[in-house]
Amino acid sequence: MNIYVGNLDYKVDENDLKDVFQEFGTVESSKVITDKFTGKSKGFGFVTMEDDEQAKNAIEELNGATYEERVMKVNEARPKKDFNR
């Protein structure tokens, strides 16, 4: 399952994000979205977990939780829109 994680502190990196979610199960990947010009975090990212039940548990536990003094917004990511149609 692909999970959206928003309202992250700008100093949070992909390893930090992975560490937070690994408490709930196996993390396949973690990605913090950065500005393509400055390379600075945009304050959100995505985590992919292989087990849907573990992912749902992580979403339930982490949505609204405080991490690095910010209240995270965590939910199942929506599919990318296809703009080529």
Image (spheres, rainbow, N blue to C red):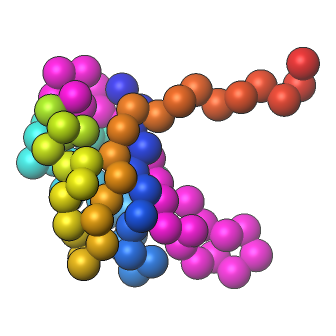
The residue at the point 72 percent across, 68 percent down is 36
Image coordinates for residue 33, horizontal then vertical, percent: 55, 60
For the C terminus, which image quadrant? Answer: top right
Residue 9 lies in the magenta-colored region: no
Is 63 on the left-hand or right-hand side of 7? left
Image coordinates for residue 22, horizontal then vertical, percent: 16, 47
Q: To which quarter of the image does residue 25 belong?
A: top left
Identify whether 34 is placed above or below 30.
below
Image coordinates for residue 17, horizontal then vertical, percent: 30, 59
- Total marks drawn? 0
Front residue (pair 78, 52):
78
The residue at the point 15 percent across, 32 percent down is 57
For the N terminus, which image quadrant? Answer: top left
Furthest residue to the right?
Answer: 85
Q: Is there any visible trace of residue 30 in the rendered image?
A: no
Q: Is there any visible trace of residue 50 in the rendered image?
A: yes
Image coordinates for residue 66, horizontal then vertical, percent: 20, 66
The residue at the point 71 percent across, 28 percent down is 81
Identify whether 75 is placed above or below 9.
above
Is 58 on the left-hand or right-hand side of 6? left
Is 65 on the left-hand or right-hand side of 31? left
Q: To which quarter of the image does residue 69 belong?
A: bottom left
Furthest residue to the left?
Answer: 23
Is 31 on the left-hand or right-hand side of 21? right
Question: What segment is highlighted magenta in the picture?
Answer: 32-56
The residue at the point 63 percent across, 76 percent down is 39
Front residue (pair 49, 10):
10
Residue 46 lies in the magenta-colored region: yes
Front residue (pair 63, 83):
63
Identify whether 21 is placed above or below 8.
above
